[in-house]
Image: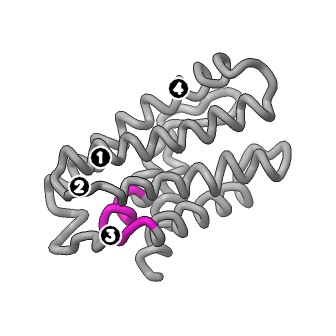
Amino acid sequence: MVECSLACAMGYVLSYIRIFTMPQGGSVTLAPVPILALSITSGIKPGAAAGFILGVLKIMTSGHVIGWVQAFIDYPAAYALLSAAALAPNKDVLTLVFFSIAAFGLKTCAHVYSGYLFFGGSLKASLIYNLSYSLPELALCVLALYALIKNGAIFNGRINKN
């Protein structure tokens, strides 16, 4: 419970340190890193819970909301999908990075789907728009996660029991 709270708090604070922001929403931050790290160390349930709560916090304070279904897909669901990183079968660095990239891909799919359904336009336009900030954010988060794993800052002797 404490780890979930800390991951949410860190993700929330990191969401306000923006490298750049797109004009119609979406920004490059390190906010996903605490959720990915929690998922890797504690499992999919704590990661999904923390991601969901972080998404709700973002809706309440700074979310771009045009409807409740859109808000749910863009925030709680998208951040909860980051917990898929916990499904890595072994805990070597490359596997964790690969599963984190896959989890980030699921998050991006949620944003693309939401953009397609609720912001008008085509699926292609939504994909291009969302990838324009998701790919730089992915690169930044993977580098940060890789550094944390390599330096032992994430595991510190703990392994996900999933």
Viewer-nearest of discs 2 and 4: 4
Circles 2 and 3 in contact, beta carbons < 8 Å? no
Circles 3 and 1 in contact, beta carbons < 8 Å? no
**Start-end of magenta stretch:** 36-44
Q: Is residue 75 above or below residue 130?
A: below
Give the secondary structure at mark 1.
Answer: helix
According to the image, label 2 marks what residue? Answer: 148
Give the secondary structure at mark 4.
Answer: helix
Q: CA distance from mark 4 to mark 3?
A: 31 Å
Viewer-nearest of discs 3 and 1: 3
Viewer-nearest of discs 4 and 3: 3
Q: Is residue 96 above or below residue 60?
A: above
Circles 2 and 1 in contact, beta carbons < 8 Å? yes
- From the top left corner, tell me how far across and down residue 98 is, in percent: 29, 42
- The three-letter code of the residue at mark 4 reads Leu
Answer left or right for 90 relative to 117.
Answer: left
Q: CA distance from mark 2 to mark 4?
A: 25 Å
- The three-letter code of the residue at mark 1 reads Ala
According to the image, label 1 marks what residue? Answer: 144
Answer left or right for 102 relative to 80.
Answer: left
Answer left or right for 19 relative to 27.
Answer: left
- From the top left corner, tell me how far across and down residue 107 is, in percent: 53, 44
Q: Is residue 137 above or below residue 121?
A: below
> In the image as oriented, which residue stretches furthest toward the right?
67
Mark toward the start of the polypeptide (4 vs 3)? 4
According to the image, label 4 marks what residue? Answer: 131
Residue placed at 73% from the left, 29% from the top? 116
Q: Which mark is residue 162?
A: 3
